[in-house]
Image (spheres, grey):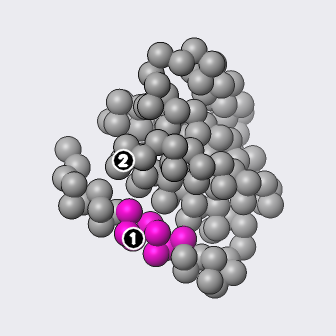
Amino acid sequence: SITAEQVQLGLEAAERNLQLAIELNKPPLPLSRAYWMLAAQEMAARQYAQAQEHFALAEQAALGTDSTAEQLLSRGFIQVAGLLADPDDPALAGKLNEVREALQEKENGEIFIQQMDDALRVFG
């Protein structure tokens, strides 16, 4: 279990990481990952709407890369955050399954699928 203090420290670190990525004009992939890390911390803090927004920004930044898997990971986590907020939404579950299927064909896809499943299990 994660303490409130740990959640707060994680949020602060992720916010600073994103701030530095922007200030240092990092390329799309590190910027995408900075947005993703912040969104993951927001998800741990049960700030699901903010997490979805930052996962969407991570996906958008990843569009500037050749990593379709990173794009799909962020897209999948938009659905994960949505399902944590509303576990009974069949549309979100369907979209997540579409992402899972697309990831199965990608390098590191199985690892990314496992990350999404783990997040649902741990935070759900």
State the image coordinates of residue 54 (x, y, percent, origin top left).
58, 54
Crowdedness near tag 1: few (<14), some (14–19) or many (≥20) residues, C-alpha within 10 Å: some
The secondary element bearing badge 2 is classed as: helix
**Label 1 near label 2: C-beta < 8 Å?**
no
State the image coordinates of residue 87 (x, y, percent, origin top left).
45, 22
Give the magenta range.
11-18
Disc 2 marks which amino acid? Ala
Apparent side of residue 59 relative to residue 111 in the rendered image (left or right): right
Residue sitting at x 32%, y 36%: 122
Query: Which numbered marker is on residue 40?
Result: none
Apparent side of residue 17 relative to residue 8 in the rendered image (left or right): right
Question: Would you name the residue on which mark 2 appears?
Answer: 44
Q: Quadrant of residue 78?
A: top right
Query: Which numbered marker is on residue 13?
Result: 1
The secondary element bearing badge 1 is classed as: helix
Disc 1 marks which amino acid? Ala
Apparent side of residue 116 relative to residue 78 in the rendered image (left or right): left
In-front residue for pair 63/82: 82
Query: Does 63 appear in magenta?
Result: no
Apparent side of residue 39 relative to residue 10 in the rendered image (left or right): right
Residue sitting at x 56%, y 44%: 52
The reply to whether residue 89 is in sight is yes
State the image coordinates of residue 41 (x, y, percent, origin top left).
41, 54
Residue sitting at x 63%, y 77%: 22
Rendered position, 117 above or below 35: above
Rendered position, 117 above or below 22: above
Marks 2 and 1, how far apart at CA: 13 Å
Q: Which image quadrant: the C terminus?
A: top left
